[in-house]
Image (cartoon, coloured by chain):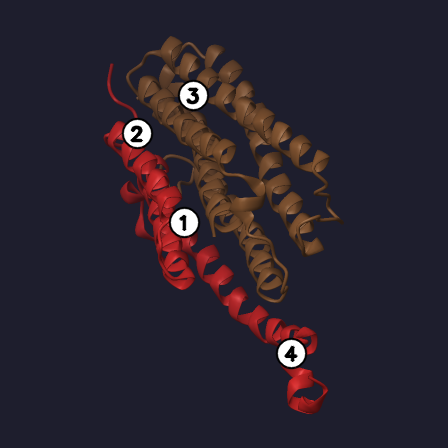
Chain colours: A brown, B red
Amino acid sequence: MATATVHSAIEPAETPLTPESWGKLGMWVFLAGDAVGFGALLAGYGAMRATSGDWPNPYAVLGINLTAIMTFLLICSSVTMVKALEWLSKGDRTRAVQYLFFTALGGAIFVSLQAYEWTHLIHRGLHINQNPWGATLFGTSFFLVTGFHGLHVTGGVIYLVSMIRYVANRPDPAASYNAVEITGLYWHFVDLVWIMVFTFMYLL
Amino acid sequence: MAETGHKHPNYMAIFWYLAILTVVEIAVIYMPLAKFTIGVLLCALAVTKAALVAMYFMHLRFEARTLGWIAVTPLAIATLLVFVLLPDGFAVLKKTDTTQQPAAAAPAKH
């Protein structure tokens, strides 16, 4: 009840879409916009690929073993994210902080693996304006799309670390529930986009 | 302690679905199928995985329906964008296709 009073004091008018907070609706609208950005990048990738005759076979050139591990890692970090929220709803702040940390760690390892993959590919001659296996645009689109996603993951890790502080500084678990749920929306979105990127840029 | 927010679904079940679907995706690309079939299968699997994440991890299933409409709008826009890019794509193909044009214009050269 105390939380409800605090919330209604900050947000007097509630939205029928997300009665919990305006922030949640705000995050959804932001994510919808961000999704159009990724959608445009992937549609552009498709158009460039369809019109280039010498497009290399992505999974033969890039190798998918490491990327499959990265995909699995991101799915795991999504699970630890929902678990953090679940612990918070049960009133266990310590566990919630722990799981937020695991989520951030998963994201950090993902970005590190991506940096390793990029370094490896650059050494083999794949650049943003150069591709030893065919169409130059392959290199351009690969670095552009995976880079855009990697930046999102990096941003997400910073967001998660700041949320660890946010939860740790609030003795009442209910007080940080909404903010952590909004963080979760962003993090799952990054996972969702990777599912698309992995399918369209590595497997297809 | 009273529960805050909505119900929490069985997250571990969703995790296993996602993990299994990822393995299936990787298996599909090595299957002796037509390229088109593989493409359709991969798209279907990706959309299924994305839907699982959105519905359960992002709790879209438990939200107002209008919020769902907000969430699928980008998908509709991106799909439209593919059709917008198609004419350009065909134009480029027509210009760069070296196998068909000379054959039609001057078949004797071959």
Q: Nearer the viewer, mark 3 or mark 4?
A: 4
The crowding category of the residue bearing disc 4, from other C-alpha atoms within 10 Å (few below 14, some 14 to 19, many at least 20), is: few
**Front in this rendered view, residue A177 or B94:** B94
Left of B17 or right of it: where is A161? right
Q: CA distance from mark 2 to mark 1?
A: 41 Å
Q: Nearer the viewer, mark 1 or mark 3?
A: 1
Q: Secondary structure at mark 2?
A: loop
Which residue is disc 2 drawn over? B5
Note whether A38 is above or below A159 in the view shown. below
In terms of image quadrants, where is residue A97? top left
| Amino acid type indicated by mark 2 | Gly
Q: CA distance from mark 3 to mark 4?
A: 58 Å
The residue at 67%/89% (across/down) is: B107
Residue that lies at the very extreme toward the right in this rendered image: A129
Q: CA distance from mark 1 to mark 4?
A: 29 Å
Upstream in sequence: badge 4 or badge 2 = 2
Instruction: Give the numbered dot on residue B94.
Output: 4
In terms of image quadrants, where is residue B14? top left
Residue B87 in the image: state x and y as whole percent: 59, 76
Q: Nearer the viewer, mark 1 or mark 4?
A: 1
Residue A36 in the image: state x and y as whole percent: 54, 53
Q: Secondary structure at mark 1?
A: helix
